[in-house]
Amino acid sequence: MADMEALKNAVIKGDQATAKDITTKAVEEGMDPESILNDGLIAGMNVIGAAFKKNEVYVPEVLIAARAMKTAMEILEPKLVEAGVEPIGTVVMGTVQGDLHDIGKNLVAMMLKGAGFNVIDLGTDVSPDKFLQAAKEHKAKVAGLSALLTTTMPMMEKTVSAFKEAGIDAKVMIGGAPVTRDYADKIGAAGFAADAASAVDIAKKLVS
Ligand code: B1M
């Protein structure tokens, strides 16, 4: 029988081949796809997230763990859809207009996916209107905005205002190296996270 502890460890180590093999075996054995997701893949990403938060692992380790999870998810996703497993919620995610930095944004997106969110990645240089239209189209519960430049941070305020004016339910969460909790409070964003692991905790709070 496919070993979920071994799958979890394969994600932690970023071992794509093993993660893929165990997931394939588990699916072939008819194991519940939700258990494979929760007890294997998400369990592994949770360990990496906690270690990243404590500076015990760094960006490269998180990226290779996320890549192992992604490989396994390609096998598991159709089974999850068949089983009707609902994601925790949809997050539309992007780097704000004028800003092309995407390494942190990608990390946050990967961690959110790892935690069971459906993430719509809008890429970089995303205008307030594009965030708004995507949140409406995908019925997102959270819009995640990343900015790395002090000059592009005002786009976060513009996006928050656009959401408020449109009166839609999605909550705006912001982050990025120059962004602070004070700034989030000042512009009326619903959430702020300093790193990718905390972004998962905040997104879970925002959808609960
Ligand atoms: Co740029 N850059 N850059 N750059 N760059 C910085 C940000 C800078 C601090 C460098 C410096 O001067 N010391 C500086 C900004 C100064 C400022 O405004 N305060 C800067 C500058 C000035 C520029 C240009 C203007 C340079 C120029 O052309 N003159 C230019 C701007 C281009 C543009 O965006 N329009 C530019 C360009 C670039 C590159 C293209 C070369 C490249 C980006 C490549 C890419 O992203 N694909 C680049 C890089 C790599 C950097 C540095 C070196 C590294 C950024 C990074 O990826 N960090 C950066 C200096 C630095 O930070 N040391 C710098 C790693 C990443 C994992 O961290 O993105 O902070 P970070 O994400 C973290 C958290 O912030 C948080 O979680 C992540 C993981 O923990 N987080 C969120 C991020 N988003 C979140 C969202 C959330 C929650 C948490 O909720 C939604």
Image (spheres, helix red, strand yellow):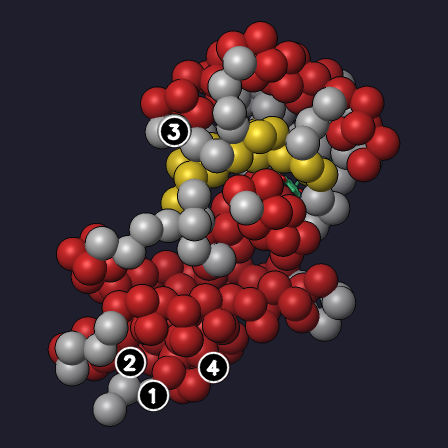
Q: Mark 3 or mark 4, which is nearer to you?
A: 3
**SS at badge 3:** loop
Q: Position of residue 84 (x, y in %)?
A: 22, 54
Kindly identify the amino acid type of the residue bearing the numbered disc 4. Answer: Asn
Q: Earlier in the sequence, mark 3 or mark 4?
A: 4
Compared with 85, 185 (above or below) is above
Kindly identify the amino acid type of the residue bearing the numbered disc 3. Answer: Lys
Which residue is the site of mark 1? 3
Compared with 171, 81 (above or below) is below
Q: Is residue 98 left or right of 65 when viewed as pictured?
A: right
Residue 70 lies in quadrant: bottom left
Residue 72 lies in quadrant: bottom left
Seen from the viewer's position, the closer of residues 152 and 5 is 5
Give me the residue at 47% from left, 81% from top: 9
Residue neighbourhood size for the residue with mark 3, other residues' Cα within 10 Å, grouped as few (<14), some (14–19), many (≥20): some
**Pointer 3 with pointer 2, Cβ within 8 A:** no
Give me the residue at 23% from left, 64% from top: 75
Q: Earlier in the sequence, mark 2 or mark 4?
A: 4
